[in-house]
Image (cartoon, rainbow, N blue to C red):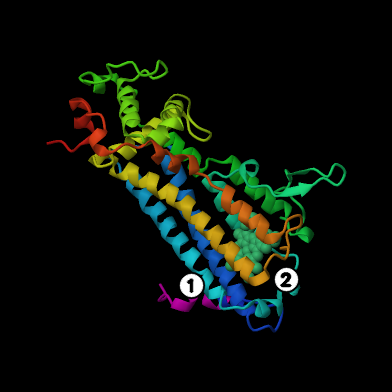
Amino acid sequence: MAPVYYNDYLRVPGLKECVRPLTTAHDEHLFIITHQTYELWFKQILFELDSVIPKLNNKFSDNSPTLFEVNHRLNRVVEIWKVLVLQFTILETMTPLDFLDFRSQLFPASGFQSLQFKEIEATLGLKSHTRFHPEQKDEKTGETKPQTDYYKHLGTEKGGFTDNDKSRIEERESSVTLLDAVKSWLNRIPFFSNDSLWIDYKGGQGSVDERINHPFWKDYVVAYRSCLTEFDKAKGKDEELIKAITEGNESFTAAEIKATLFIMSYRDYPIFHLPFQLLTNVTEVDELLSDWRHRHVYVVMRMIGTRSGTKAGASGAAYLKGIAEKNYVFKDLSALVTYLIPRKDLPALPEKLLEKIGYMD
Ligand code: HEM
């Protein structure tokens, strides 16, 4: 076999060929390289997400390396996002005047058309109808309403997507997402469906609320109440917890919420180390995407102020602020920390269960 040559293997000449400015403005070169670098990292993120979703979605043995692999790759996604947030500082060496030297030539292309970015969001679990929709004034009634068709195909002449790209996003939205896979995994966590593990459980004697039927959760609610401040009690935080563990919330069922709270609360036990890390990784990806969106708004404000972007139908920065506030996937999961209680107040677990979640002595 011929020796591998660095420049051939990495296709460096082809890569350099990809930088093709439309103008002679000096900073357009940096503008292109920056966006291309982002797109390459987006490709890597999609590659990792596509590899972990089927692993997590399908049943695997606790003794297999699957959960470690899933975590390892999600952690890589977390690290990439950290770099992507930082990377804006290089583009910010371009000043607004430098940008004006070539901006008009790029019309109507827009970051909105980044297929891979929208694919990442859809693969995480964001759907078109759950995204932020900019408001629009109805010409006839003068009423302001969310623009429901904002993500529909508008055609490239208006800063929208091509038919193919639009279909690709829809395909991603209707496939199994990371959110679906995390939910499926949480539903497979067995501790409350196996009564034999709770046979020697000592608590659960008091009557708390008839909606709660497991003794552990009765004790958990009592312990939660006793650690609330008067202010939080008055706000009905305990009722909120009961509602969450009996009815669920907007994104997660009651069973998924109970599994999450159990992992978070007893995460010091060996069997929960990796599950806890997984929950941390998915919420961190969500937070870093939000960091990225906020950082991007600052860049946009700095470069074009409050001028419109190129995507028809919304003022650039106003739209970007809206997506930064709204477009989360795991917000309802990270919000469960509201219902944690101090370690010293956690119900003592029964022997049989402790054997299951600890190392064998
Ligand atoms: C000079 C710097 C930049 C400016 C002025 C800018 C401007 C904008 C504006 C105004 C929008 C809103 C859509 C529109 O109205 O056209 C947008 C969206 C977007 N931009 Fe940028 N951008 C800049 C840099 C970047 C970079 C470096 C990336 C990296 C890939 C990026 C990725 C995106 C993405 C993904 C969206 C769509 C967000 C969404 O719809 O959720 N932008 N950009």
Please name the residue that numbered disc 1 is placed on: 10
Identify which residue is drawn at 31% across, 30% down.
Answer: 226
Quadrant in the picture for residue 274: top left
- Placement of 239 over or under 46, stated as above or below: above
Q: Determine if the C-beta at disc 2 is less than 8 A from ligand 1.
A: no
Q: Give coordinates of residue 151: x percent, y percent.
A: 70, 49
Q: Secondary structure at mark 1?
A: loop
Mark 2 or 1, closer to the camera: 2
- Placement of 96 over or under 331, stated as above or below: below
Q: Nearer the viewer, residue 50 or 124?
A: 124
| 315 in the magenta segment | no
Magenta segment range? Answer: 1-14
User: Do the numbered discs 2 and 1 sit on residues whose CB atoms are within 8 Å?
Assistant: no
In the picture, measured across the screen, residue 282 lies left or right of residue 117, that is left
Q: Give coordinates of residue 337: x percent, y percent.
A: 39, 41
In the picture, measured across the screen, residue 155 lies left or right of residue 305, that is right
Q: Give coordinates of residue 310: x percent, y percent.
A: 73, 63
Identify which residue is drawn at 32% across, 48% down.
Answer: 68
So how many labels did they put on this image?
2
Identify which residue is drawn at 44% across, 77% down.
Answer: 6
Query: For residue 106, which numbered disc appears in the image?
Result: 2
Residue type at numbered disc 1: Leu
